[in-house]
Image (cartoon, rainbow, N blue to C red):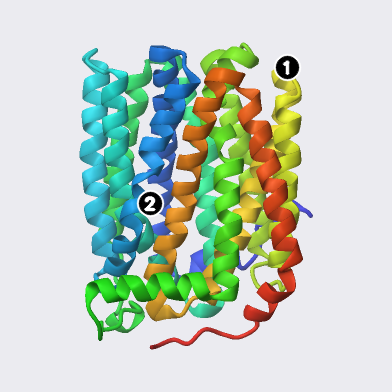
Amino acid sequence: MPVSSLLRAPLLALLARNANFRTFTIGNTVSLVGMWMERIAVGWLTWQLTESGFWLGVVAFADFFPVVVIAPFAGALADRWDKVRVVQVSQFILLIQAIVLWGATASGHITVTLIVLLTAIHGIVVAFNQPARLALVPSLVPRADVGAAVAINAVSFNLARFIGPIFAGLAIVWSGVAAAFAANAVTYVVYLVALSRIRIAPAEEDQAAAPTGFFAEIRDGIRYTATHPAIGSLLFLLIALGVGGKPLTELMPGFADEVFQAGAAGLSILASSVGAGAILAGLWLGNRTHSSNLLGIALVTTLGQAVAAVAIIATDRLWLAVPAVLVYGFCIAASGIASQTLVQLASARHMRGRVMSLYGLVFRGGPAIGALGAGIISVHLGLRWPVAIGAMLLVMAWLWTYLIRRRIEAALQGEPPDSP
């Protein structure tokens, strides 16, 4: 498909006609660049301090696992509270965390224990922030544009995934790890300024007065999500994508240094290749957000992710691995965007915060379990075996989802109610 076609409406047109969403996207993208700089720098610093795949897994677990405990509560709060305010408070706390991480590293007081602690704080705050941030996106655009907005959000995430590692690699090589942490802190300030300029009319906030108690809302959200034939099945597929597919990303510092012998520069190339593939997926899907074949796209790219992962671990040459990493990034993003779009469109508006909190639980909790398991396995069997086992899990999840695809498609036919 020509690049000019990829850049046509609905992506750029949606940004041009919607000031709130445009402001949110700019601020969010800048902040995400900083987040990826921190993630790459934390991984590299952890590897420098320990040279252990186990500790890489522990750090990733500390970042991702808090959502498993917090997500149901955060989702209910997102349906009750001002979503913009929740995101603002979260970003301010993350700004403080980034400053502490920079200070400890620059002063030479950083330890792997402190890295785990600060990463866990980051994971806790993101667990509260994510449901509100994801549920906010449909409030910024008309329903007809939700699919395109989700795609743009994913493009922003993956553009940052491409740019962030490049900047992180340059910062580490030229100025040290602390410089990457300082840059991340600056990006939070930019995002806070952008959020202060967003104005949403009360009617657009999709918030409903709660007729039941807080814990009853949590229970209702879990029941609604688990029993919905489409949403529940899509989240199961996303669990497999997280547990089976994401560990390769978390183990990349080890692959860059130990397998490909390429150091921090190699890590930057690998991580940016994942991001480049993901950007292409987001642009491609941006013009297919109303397609009836999104489920088919999710299935094909799940299988493609497994094949690409096996190709990556089959070589010890960086130049051979990079094209497979590019495909791997494309498949990660395409399966994730397609699945999230279907979940957003299938969710009733008054349940959206709770549904997206459980989506966030799966999105971050799956990689937490996968990363910890991969770290443990890598200690005994090396870095390649966790990736191979994850690829087998992806194939099994693809087969199960393929067998029940007709039931999922049938459940997606009806439009969700807008009110209780």
Q: Is residue 367 above or below residue 399?
A: above
Residue count near mark 2 (Cα–Cα under 10 Å), binned few <14, some 14–19, many ≥20 = many
Q: Residue at x 52, y 39 (%)?
A: 370
266 and 198: which one is in front? Answer: 266
Residue annotated with mark 1? 317
Q: Which mark is residue 375?
A: none
Q: Is residue 140 visible?
A: no
Q: Percent position (x, y) of residue 275?
A: 58, 39
Q: Is residue 260 above or below residue 117?
A: above
As drawn, is 116 to the left or to the right of 140?
Answer: left
- Residue positioned most to the right: 1
Q: Earlier in the sequence, mark 1 or mark 2?
A: 2
Q: Which amino acid does the dot numbered 1 rest on? A: Arg
Q: Percent position (x, y) of residue 381?
A: 61, 20
Q: Which mark is residue 68?
A: 2
149 and 390: which one is in front? Answer: 390
Dividing the picture into quarters, in which one does residue 352 lie? bottom left
Q: Is residue 208 above or below residue 33?
A: below
Q: Is residue 178 above or below residue 372?
A: above
As drawn, is 70 to the left or to the right of 297?
Answer: left
252 and 220: which one is in front? Answer: 220
Q: Which amino acid does the dot numbered 2 rest on? A: Val
How many angstroms separate mark 1 from mark 2 (CA)? 37 Å
Q: Can you say which quadrant of the picture contains the C terminus?
A: bottom left
Q: Residue at x 47, y 17 (%)?
A: 52
As drawn, is 416 to the left or to the right of 406?
Answer: left
- Residue positioned most to the front: 380
Q: Percent position (x, y) of residue 164?
A: 47, 35
Dividing the picture into quarters, in which one does residue 178 lie? top left
